[in-house]
Image: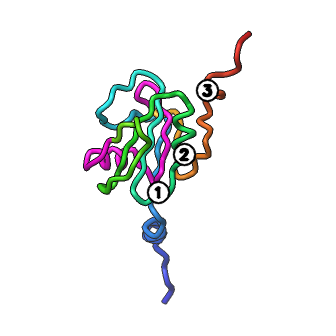
């Protein structure tokens, strides 16, 4: 008796063993949120177990852009003074609708659409110079 392979079944089993990867998608519209998004803004999505975010907050605040803080996962965590924090079930739903895979996530948005995203990898550069192009004399 010869053993026949079931290629479709093998593929489905292989796909089922791969970890699901959440990915924020560039160009997507932001999910429902409580603020007005008229121009460029930075959204920081974080949770209570992100550790020390001091350097991240400094870099974000130094950008000069409006900052939106989203404290997801139902356990309050602080943000710098003067930054309004969105917390609770709706904030967590926002983070999950974005498909954030790793906290902290930094989202650069403009007009309610995602321009760029860093999930757990933000190093302080929003890439604004690249977006704005070279300065004209």
Of the two numbered discs 2 and 3 in the rendering, the one whose residue sits closer to the viewer: 2
Relative to 13, residue 137 above or below:
above
Q: Is residue 78 magenta?
A: no
Relative to 19, residue 118 above or below:
above
SS at mark 2 in the image: helix
Whether residue 12 sits left or right of residue 60 in the image: it is left
Whether pointer 2 and pointer 3 mark residues with C-beta atoms closer than 8 Å, the reply is: no
Residue at 33% from the left image edge and 44% from the top image edge: 94
Dot 2 alpha-carbon crowd within 10 angstroms: few under 14, some 14 to 19, many 20 or more: some
Whether residue 116 sits left or right of residue 8 in the image: it is right
Whether pointer 1 and pointer 3 mark residues with C-beta atoms closer than 8 Å, the reply is: no
Disc number for residue 56? 2
Dot 1 alpha-carbon crowd within 10 angstroms: few under 14, some 14 to 19, many 20 or more: few
On the image, the x and y values in percent for residue 17 come to: 46, 70
Residue at 39% from the left image edge and 49% from the top image edge: 78
Residue at 48% from the left image edge and 26% from the top image edge: 40
Q: CA distance from mark 2 to mark 1?
A: 11 Å
Of residue 38 and residue 59, the one placed in the foreground of this image is 59
Of residue 65 and residue 116, the one placed in the foreground of this image is 65
* Magenta stretch bounds: 86-113
Q: Name the N-terminal-most of marks 2 and 3.
A: 2
Which residue is outermost to the right?
Answer: 137
Q: CA distance from mark 2 to mark 3?
A: 20 Å
The residue beneath circle 1 is 50
């Amino acid at each position: 008796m010869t053993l026949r392979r079931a290629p479709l079944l093998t593929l489905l089993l292989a796909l089922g063993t791969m970890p699901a990867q959440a990915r924020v998608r560039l160009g997507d519209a932001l999910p429902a949120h409580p603020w007005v998004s008229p121009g460029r803004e930075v959204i920081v999505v974080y949770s209570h177990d992100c550790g020390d975010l001091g350097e991240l907050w400094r870099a974000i605040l130094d950008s000069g852009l409006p900052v939106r803080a989203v404290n997801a996962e139902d356990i309050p965590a602080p943000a710098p003074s003067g930054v309004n924090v969105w917390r609770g079930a709706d904030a967590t739903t926002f983070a999950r609708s974005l498909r954030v895979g790793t906290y902290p996530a930094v989202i650069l948005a403009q007009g309610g659409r995602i321009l760029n995203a860093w999930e757990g990898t933000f190093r302080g550069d929003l890439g604004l110079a690249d977006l704005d192009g070279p300065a004209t004399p």
